[in-house]
Amino acid sequence: MNLMIEKIPELLNATILTIQLTLFSLIVGIFLGLFFAILRLNKNKVVSGFSYYYSFIFRGTPLLVQLFIIYFGLAQLEFIRESFLWTVLKKPFWCAIIAFALNTGAYTAEIFRSGFEKVDKQLIDAAKSLGMSKYNTFYKIILPVGLKRSIPAYGNEMILMLKGTSLASTVTLIDLTGAAKYIISTHFNPVEVFIFTGSIYLFFTFLIHNFIKFIEKKTNYIYKT
């Protein structure tokens, strides 16, 4: 216990990085997910196919592999190192954000697509009968109702992304898991350290869970489906 009290400041600093990685990744990922979900609904096979294979690739390969390709793999390409992209890709923080955002974006796209496709067809038919254009039907009915239906599943994705950031330590970032590993390697007390670290992750999972419940209650007052 004395060890954990001594290492609390170190773990809290690492927790800040974990929070930053999670928030940045989710913010970028939700926009990517919405964009590719809309593309997936497009009747053009090339457009919808592009969205499908984006989701297929990033959901079908391990996040760790994606992170390594972006951090280690792209650095091997000379034209990348000589371009303006290198100012971003040479930093492990931004490489991690890119990998995490692309990964969560793929899962988010499928969550939103599923939500859009589950919108009651009677609502869509009612919109058409009122003379609403396809554009207005989508943005005034399908989009808000679909997003509402997606909230519980997206909450799970938020939690998975929080836990997924633990891979950041593999590219030299000292996140919460990375700090725990370092403390264990120097003090040889894995059980105590991992229990404390797991409790921090559990606390943030609790916050996300209750945040999603709050959003669900709020949206229930707005949309009755």
Image (spheres, helix red, strand yellow):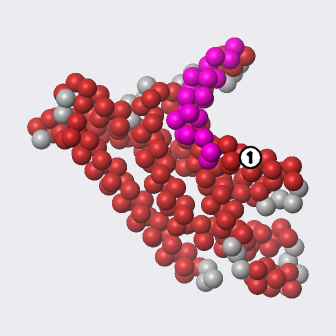
| Residue at 36% over, 32% down | 178
Return the residue at label 1: 53
Q: Position of residue 217 (x, y in %)?
A: 49, 76
| 110 falls in the magenta region | no
Q: In the rendered view of the protein, which quadrant contains the C terminus?
A: bottom right
Q: Position of residue 214 (x, y in %)?
A: 45, 70
Q: Is residue 30 above or below residue 5?
A: below
Residue 12 showing in the rendered view = yes
Residue 115 as seen in the image, left or right of residue 189: right
Mark 1, other Cα within 10 Å: few <14 / some 14–19 / many ≥20: few
Residue 22 as seen in the image, left or right of residue 44: left
Choose top left, top right, bottom left or bottom right for residue 137: bottom right
Q: In front: 51, or 80?
A: 51
| Residue at 32% over, 55% down | 203
Q: What element carries label 1?
A: helix
Choose top left, top right, bottom left or bottom right for residue 89: top right
Q: What stretch is highlighted in magenta?
A: 59-78
